[in-house]
Amino acid sequence: MSLAQRIRDNVARSRRTTAEILGVTAELMESHEQAIEQLAATRSLPYRPWTVKTMQQTIGNFRQAQAHFLELYGIRAKGWVALIEKVNTIENALVHLGYRDRSPKQ
């Protein structure tokens, strides 16, 4: 077998291998997209951010809420609005990262 023929054979083998790799990659991507869609379907409940009213009903007065979230997340705030903005930001990030589910607060 000549050198030219060996090069042609190697090129053909390389193309077949590349085509196989691309085919398997496409299958993996489809499987991955299906898994993401299934996960999104299980997490379809809306996230309900805190409001002053819900926080007061759930936790109590501002001092209690302040102490609770200082211990829980290590955040400090001097008023309801600042506290709620910080807590909602953290909890939204936790939901987005998958550390907490989107179920509504009780």
Image (spheres, rainbow, N blue to C red):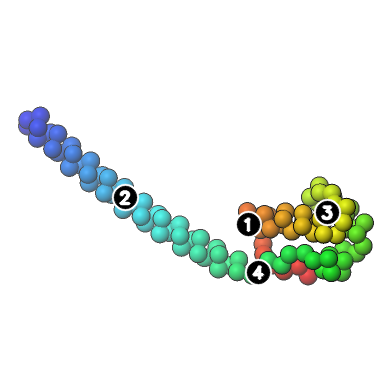
Under tag 3, what secondary structure?
A: helix
Residue appearing at x 84%, y 69% in the figure:
53
Among the two numbered marks 4 and 1 on one chain, the one whose residue lies closer to the N terminus:
4
Residue appearing at x 72%, y 55% in the figure:
89
Q: Nearer the viewer, residue 52 or 47?
A: 52
Disc 4 target residue: 46
Among the two numbered marks 3 and 2 on one chain, the one whose residue lies closer to the N terminus:
2
Label 4 and label 3: CA atoms lie apart by: 22 Å
Could you tell me the amino acid type at mark 2? Leu
Among the two numbered marks 4 and 3 on one chain, the one whose residue lies closer to the N terminus:
4
* Image location of residue 101, percent across then percent down: 67, 62
Under tag 2, what secondary structure?
A: helix
* Image location of residue 12, percent across then percent down: 17, 42
Residue 9: quarter of image: top left
Q: In this view, does 44 lie to the left or right of 59?
A: left
- Label 2–label 4 contact, CB within 8 A: no
Residue 4: quarter of image: top left
Q: Is residue 43 left or right of residue 63?
A: left
Residue 22's label in the rendered image is 2
Disc 1 target residue: 96
Q: Which of 38 and 48 is in front in this view?
A: 48
Under tag 4, what secondary structure?
A: loop
Could you tell me the amino acid type at mark 3? Phe
Name the quarter where the C terminus is drawn: bottom right
Among the two numbered marks 1 and 3 on one chain, the one whose residue lies closer to the N terminus:
3
Could you tell me the amino acid type at mark 1? His
Residue 33: quarter of image: bottom left
Could you tell me the amino acid type at mark 4? Pro
Q: Badge 3, how many Cα within 10 Å: few under 14, some, many 20+?
A: some
Disc 3 target residue: 69
Q: In this view, does 5 lie to the left or right of 93?
A: left
Label 2 and label 4: CA atoms lie apart by: 38 Å
